[in-house]
Image: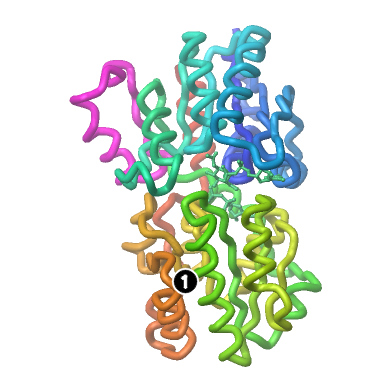
Amino acid sequence: MRRRVLLVFGTRPEAIKMCPLVNELKRRDQLETLVCVTGQHREMLHQVLDVFGVVPDYDLDIMEDAQTLSGVTTSVLQGMRGILDATSPDVVLVHGDTTTSLASALAAFYAQVPVGHVEAGLRTYDLDSPFPEEFNREAVDLLSAYCFAPTKRARENLQAEMPTIAAAPRRRVFVTGNTGIDALRTTVRPDYSNPTLDWAEGSRLLLVTAHRRENLGDPMVHMFRAIRRVVEETEDVKVIYPVHMNPRVREVARAELGGCDRIRLVEPLDVVDFHNFMQRSYLILTDSGGIQEEAPSLGKPVLVMRDTTERPEGVAAGTLRLVGTDEKAIHAACRELLDDPSAYAAMAHASNPYGDGHACERIADVLCQE
Ligand code: UD1
Ligand code: UDP
């Protein structure tokens, strides 16, 4: 009997890190691999599925405009009940820290199906930052039978809490590397070209993304004002910002960064485009989680516009710097990297703290050996 594995994911970052795993698991004869997408994201999720050629077996299609955390949680929990009844999986795999991850892991737990958590053990130990992701990942780890930790540090976080948790006797922890690095191995191409990149040719390109819930409103206004100031005072700098589809992000982006010749606000890029844009950029400014993992491999300095990070490995490697959301601090950090070649060189070196690009094979090996 083949072991039936059900992967559940719903947002862009989960898809980027789960699709390479889907494709690896499908190559294993010992496993029957099924995919359920929750549709927490719609356009941004389908962009990724198309790139990796993954066709879901089930789509809960739950996304609504201005959706709430309670609404997403309820829809996924309800929807997953039917999927679990219909598929009777031997194991359910979820990824990371989204509402999809939490609710689908909880649904599996209620159905007494073992959960495998891909990208387990990340921590800021701050419930407000990132919100609500820190709670989500801690909660998913609490009920998971398999914790696939991307780094040794993540494994240490999981081991440190073992003495206090009920799940300890059945929890098994494996260090696998991050599956996002597997994805990166297939996307960056030396012969890549794109008209938007041509527009930035000859300038230093700042690539920007922003979407964190705790940054919506004033922090985002300050982040964008700092970026606009840098562009307006530096002639050889151009900005490309693929704007997240959250209307609350779009509104501030348009108001603060619109109408400037050297700033392009574009639609979300597909992952092949985005990774190649990263590769051509001078500097990245972001509050994203996944970009903090990808940039060190590409040797691109990242100013992380957050107060905390669950990815300290990239900070230790020297490619990430936490700058918070204060306008002056972001402006000063940008200026240093634009004006001081030695400060730039100190951050712009490739290192790979998140694995060797073979994380999916390691996870598949564990699932096949059970
Ligand atoms: C969610 C995740 C966050 C992750 C981020 C990735 C949670 C709690 N948060 O953010 O961890 O970093 O996704 O991007 O799960 N929208 C569209 N089309 C899309 C996607 C989004 O129109 O393809 C719009 C919708 O109006 C939607 C809104 O964006 O209501 C917000 O999406 P949502 O998934 O709720 O965003 P976050 O929770 O902020
Ligand atoms: N990304 C993308 N297109 C974009 C912006 C980002 O494909 O226009 C990719 C990026 O390379 C990374 C992931 O999306 O792999 C990060 O997603 P996001 O920032 O939405 O979520 P987070 O990682 O913060 O959870």
Q: How many numbered marks have been drawn onto this rendered protein structure?
A: 1
- Residue at horizontal 73%, vertical 78%? 259
Q: Which residues are magenta?
A: 150-176
In the visual, does 178 lie left or right of 186? left
Q: Between residue 65 and residue 302, name the one nearer to us.
A: 65
Whether residue 158 appears in magenta in the rendering, the answer is: yes
The residue located at (18%, 25%) in the rendering is: 163
Residue 303 percent location from the top left of the image: 45, 69
Q: Quadrant of ligand 1?
A: top right
- Vertical order, 287 against 82 (above or below): below
In this rendering, the answer to whether 298 lies above or below 65 is: below
Whole-percent x and y of residue 121? 36, 38
Q: Amino acid at mark 1?
A: Pro
Closer to the camera, 213 or 94? Answer: 213
| Residue receiving disc 1 | 301
* Residue at image location 65% in from the left, 73% down from the top: 257
42 in the magenta segment: no
Residue 27 falls in image quadrant: top right
Quadrant of the rendered structure where residue 314 is?
bottom left
Residue that lies at the very extreme toward the left in this rendered image = 163
Q: Is residue 75 above or below residue 99?
A: above
Give above or below for 70 relative to 179: above
| Secondary structure of the residue carrying numbered label 1 | loop
* Disc 1 CB within 8 Å of nearest ligand 2 atom: no
Quarter-wise, where is residue 148 in the image? top left
